[in-house]
């Protein structure tokens, strides 16, 4: 966690720090202008929007060629990813591609984990910021923030099995 030059907390740290700084800034601004909102209302205004930042961040993982999914053979990739653009599939090909190493053997492809997580986070953003805000008027303050935590935790739990073994963080015998 403290060795930020080796990754630190990664996305968890970014989410925590981003939420804390966003809430602090908003509260400071409201106080300066004489406005009052409950912290849970403020959290509901800020925290669900982190999902959009995470969508952008996952595409950053793709362009930086990092945090790939598990390796699959060429037949699986071409059969199941036919809808994806060719340039995207080719960037997931194992071995050296464009001078950068992809951590799968030649003739295998890395799962597009960034795409799976990005799409699911976008769906979560729509559900939280459009559907819940618009159609559930009588909700308790903090519902959208709790929804973010539940949604993102569930997405990460479901996608963990698709990760490349190299990118699974371990602490003793426990995977994180």
Image: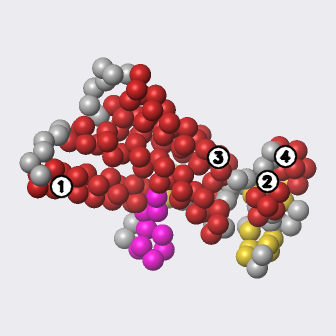
- Helix, strand or loop at label 3? It is helix
* Residue bearing mark 2: 85
Q: Which residue is found at the position 55% from the left and 43% from the top?
A: 122
Confirm whether the magenta stretch covers residue 6: yes
Instruction: Determine the secondary structure under disc 4.
Output: loop
Residue 66 quadrant: bottom right
> Disc 2 or disc 3, which is closer to the eye?
2
Name the spot of residue 131 as percent of width and height, x first. 46, 28
Residue stretch in magenta: 3-11
Q: Nearer the viewer, mark 4 or mark 2?
A: 2
Q: Which residue is mark 1?
A: 29
Q: Which residue is rendered at x = 48% and y = 40% of the image?
A: 125
Q: CA distance from mark 4 to mark 1?
A: 49 Å
Q: In this image, 19 relative to 113: left or right? A: left
Residue 44: % across, % down: 31, 39
Q: Earlier in the sequence, mark 2 or mark 1?
A: 1
Measure the alpha-carbon separation of dots 2 and 1. Answer: 44 Å
Residue at which label 4 appears = 82
The crowding category of the residue bearing disc 1, from other C-alpha atoms within 10 Å (few below 14, some 14 to 19, many at least 20), is: few
Rendered image quadrant of residue 158 = top right
**Alpha carbon separation for disc pair 1 and 3:** 36 Å
Determine crowd level at label 2: few under 14, some 14-19, many 20+ residues with C-alpha closer than 10 A: few
Quadrant where the N terminus lies? Answer: bottom left
Label 3: how many residues lie within 10 Å, few (<14), some (14-19) or many (20+)? some
Query: What residue does disc 3 label?
Result: 116
Taking the view exactly as shown, the residue that stands out farthest to the left is 34
Q: Which residue is painted at 33% across and 22% down in the image?
A: 137
Q: Is residue 19 left or right of residue 38?
A: right
Front-most of residues 141 and 14: 141
- The relative height of residue 48 versus residue 141 in the rendered view (above or below) is below
Of discs 4 and 3, which sits in the foreground? 4
């Amino acid at each position: 966690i403290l060795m930020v030059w080796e990754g630190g907390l990664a996305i968890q740290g970014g989410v925590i720090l981003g939420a804390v700084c966003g809430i602090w800034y908003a509260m400071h601004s409201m106080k300066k202008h004489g406005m009052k909102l409950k912290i849970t209302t403020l959290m509901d205004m800020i925290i669900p929007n982190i999902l959009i930042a995470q969508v952008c961040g996952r595409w950053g993982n793709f362009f930086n060629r990092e945090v790939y999914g598990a390796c699959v053979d060429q037949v699986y990739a071409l059969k199941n990813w036919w809808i994806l653009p060719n340039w995207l599939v080719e960037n997931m090909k194992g071995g050296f591609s464009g001078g950068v190493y992809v951590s799968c053997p030649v003739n295998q492809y890395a799962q597009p984990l960034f795409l799976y997580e990005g799409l699911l986070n976008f769906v979560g953003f729509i559900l939280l910021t459009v559907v819940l805000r618009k159609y559930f008027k009588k909700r308790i303050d903090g519902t959208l923030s709790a929804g973010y935590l539940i949604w993102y935790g569930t997405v990460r739990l479901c996608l963990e099995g698709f990760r490349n073994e190299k990118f699974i963080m371990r602490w003793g015998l426990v995977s994180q």
